[in-house]
Amino acid sequence: QVQLEESGGGWVQPGGSLSLSCRASLPISTIYQVGWYRQAVLGPQRALVASVTDRDGTEYADSAKGRFAISRDNAENTVNLQMNGLKPEDTSVYLCAAQVTYTAGIKYYWGQGIQVTVSS
């Protein structure tokens, strides 16, 4: 079982910055992809915000491009999401997810979620 420890988040005014951190119980070099998702306002869907692979390939939601930056620190088994220029519509519960490949297939692990609130 892979455990994901999330930290960061909180409240910030529009235009401000926050950072989210996700630490895995396994070396992230052995995890194919780690991403940050946010809970949809309507329904249970979780939308990708940003992700990074074990080879540092990155993917961003259109709404995050130019404002957010995701990176991984293999020495600390940590993935960081730096969020700049935050907007009220960024308010959500953010969840870290890890994609791990086993011989039998692919397994996904999720953190508990952390609140990000952007308001004046």
Image (spheres, helix red, strand yellow):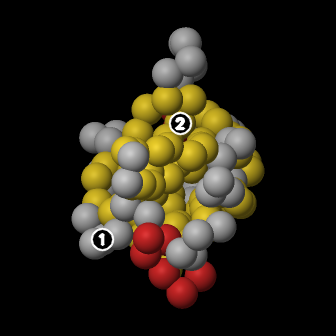
Q: Position of residue 56 (x, y in %)?
A: 30, 71
- Asked whether, in this view, residue 64 is left or right of residue 8, the answer is left
Q: Position of residue 106 (x, y in %)?
A: 39, 45
Q: Is residue 88 above or below residue 71?
A: above
> Please, what is the three-letter code of the amino acid marked with disc 1?
Asp
Q: How many marks?
A: 2
Residue 89 seen from this side: yes
Residue at 64% x, 36% y is 93
| Nearest to the observer: residue 22 or residue 89 | 22
Question: Residue 56 — which label?
Answer: 1
Question: Residue 38 — which label?
Answer: 2
* N-terminal-most mark, 1 or 2: 2
Quadrant containing the C terminus is top right
Element at label 2: strand
Residue at 71% x, 42% y is 112
- How dense is the environment of label 1, judged by Cα within 10 Å: few (below 14), some, or many (20 and up)? few
Q: Nearer the viewer, mark 1 or mark 2?
A: 1
| Nearest to the observer: residue 68 or residue 34 | 34
Q: How much space separates mark 1 and mark 2, taking CA atoms?
A: 21 Å
Residue at 37% x, 45% y is 105
Element at label 1: loop
Q: Which of the 4 image quarters holds residue 24? A: bottom right
Quadrant containing the N terminus is bottom right
